[in-house]
Amino acid sequence: MVLKGRAWKYGDDVDTDVIIPARYLNTSDPAELARHCMEDIDREYAARVAPGDFLVAGKNFGCGSSREHAPIAIKASGASAVIARSFARIFYRNAFNTGLPIFEAPRAVDEIDAGDLLAVDMRNGSLRNETKGREYGIAPIPPFMQELVAAGGLLRYMAARRKERVGP
Amino acid sequence: MGMTLTEKILARHAGKEKVEPGELILARVDLALGNDVTSPLAIQAFRSLGIGEVFDREKIALVPDHFTPNKDIRSADQARMMRDFAREQGIVNYFEVGRMGIEHVLLPDEGLVVPGDLVIGADSHTCTYGALCAFSTGVGSTDLAAAMISGEVWLKVPESVRIVLSGRPGKWVEGKDIILHIIGTIGVDGALYQSMEYAGDGLAALPMAWRFTISNMAIEAGAKNGIFPFDGVTKAYADGRSAREYAVVVADRDARYSGEIAVDLGALEPQVAFPHLPENSRPLSRVGNVPIDQVVVGSCTNGRIEDLRSACSVLRGRKVHGNVRMLVFPATQEIHLQAMREGLAEIFVEAGAAFSTPTCGPCLGGHMGILAQGERAVATTNRNFVGRMGHPESEVYLANPAVAAASAVLGRIGSPDEIS
């Protein structure tokens, strides 16, 4: 699967309060959350993001609260993935659990400018900056997580484990 | 090679003799927690699989604390969804408004978390219980749903960094200052994916309330958890509090740590974290002139009775500055009652502060104290991100309760010494 779109570039320590401010957490409707995604640091993003675009950021992306509304908002905004130097740990789990692809690619992040056209090939694990004509490797998904994906996600995996132990 | 506190607790809950950093495990949870903001997504996920019952109705805690007492119709709908689920499933540990508290203060106080436990919660400050020598960490709603289904969580065993505390803290220095100093030193991702394990002779000077504050803000350094060794202070808190027996876990002498950070408590001043990251901490003497509009005392970080006592020790007989709104949130009903019995509520109200029912409200910019454009607050809470307490152009300065109370009197960030 190839993801393709333009880069929206942000700095270090983008926290979940700016990804989706708490004042909107009185709903879990993805479309509504998406309308307010990133608005406290970027008024343009939610209105202008195109399907397939990427959020590109520095270190510790998604720090702060455990709200799963954050990856849900990003995914529903149309973005195809987040590329960062590093991710905060709860965001990393939540992105995986909600099916938002995320990639740690420090060197690529340094060389990506806002608006660059990017393509990620999930099969061969490559990230291409088409604007700059550069290519980077991205780390594959850890084996345990591949197992979860194969089982149809974390919930189905856990449901199967429960069935094994206590019966249907 | 021996094991750290975190490795030992994780091994025990994964049914293994030994675990090593980097290893992925499935671990049994003693308690899984959700609140009125994170539970609705977990409940939807749980129901989507058509599973009838939760794995154990005594091992799930549901606490409406974020947008409660209900701030608007949609928050009321979310709170109702959690309440209905709790009733339908017979969840034993559901705490209604009027009998509740902020989750991370309530659950240990009620004896629902005990030393040696493994606890996950769909709230990032679930790491608070490390103060009890338990392993606890924040997860998302899907992880909570998975735990409600199977009673398990997948975890990557973290490396542990050892934080060695020495000496005795000086006047007006509290747990909050210790953790703000550490975050200021290592940064908001300084312990990313790691466990922060405390040690050293300075521990003896740390009461339980301070330890909760310090573990609570482990997430603000990117850590998975922040854990204290079991000692006499832990024992005094834990004994007789729970119907469940606790387990005393001790780190091996030859445990492996990824690094060590030394903190001389005697050299610390009270700290203030400037906008917009908790790592922007400075000693109080280097704050300068920062006029303020609001002071918030409360939250899972600093809403305990000891915190209210500390604020009152400064506020007693004084008045909140004419330009300042001071809001006080005891973290639980029990603390609220205790504050009334001790006369603390009276001190706050006579000083001109609002004394509220427990809620997370203002800490996350939910309700009960939202800041307007350009306004500044001193708060005993845990985060000062852009827009955290309201308008994206408002500012939050993090401090301990005594400094917050002094600032309320002065109308600017200042020291209790300036008014006493």
Image (cartoon, helix red, strand yellow):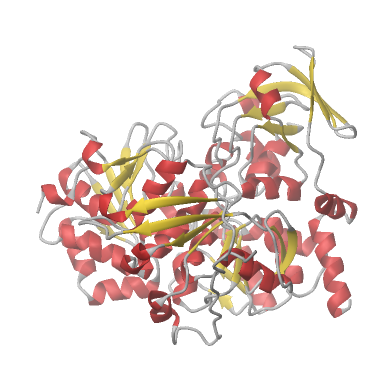
Residue A51, quarter of picture: top right
Q: Report x, y in % for residue A1.
A: 90, 33
* Position of the N terminus of chain B by quadrant: bottom right
Q: Report x, y in % for residue A38.
A: 58, 32
The answer to which of B30 and B41 lies nearer the viewer is B30
Residue at left offset 77%, top offset 64%: B47
Residue at left offset 67%, top offset 78%: B57
* Position of the C terminus of chain B by quadrant: bottom left
The vertical placement of B136 against A17, above or below, is below
Residue B118, quarter of picture: bottom right
The answer to which of B58 and B306 lies nearer the viewer is B306
Residue at left offset 42%, top offset 40%: B279
Residue B96: in sight, yes or no? yes
Residue at left offset 84%, top offset 79%: A166
Residue B380: in sight, yes or no? no
Q: Report x, y in % for residue B158.
A: 63, 55
The vertical placement of B382 against A87, above or below, is below
The vertical placement of B176 against B246, above or below, is above
Q: Report x, y in % for residue B133.
A: 51, 70
Residue B358 located left or right of residue B35: left
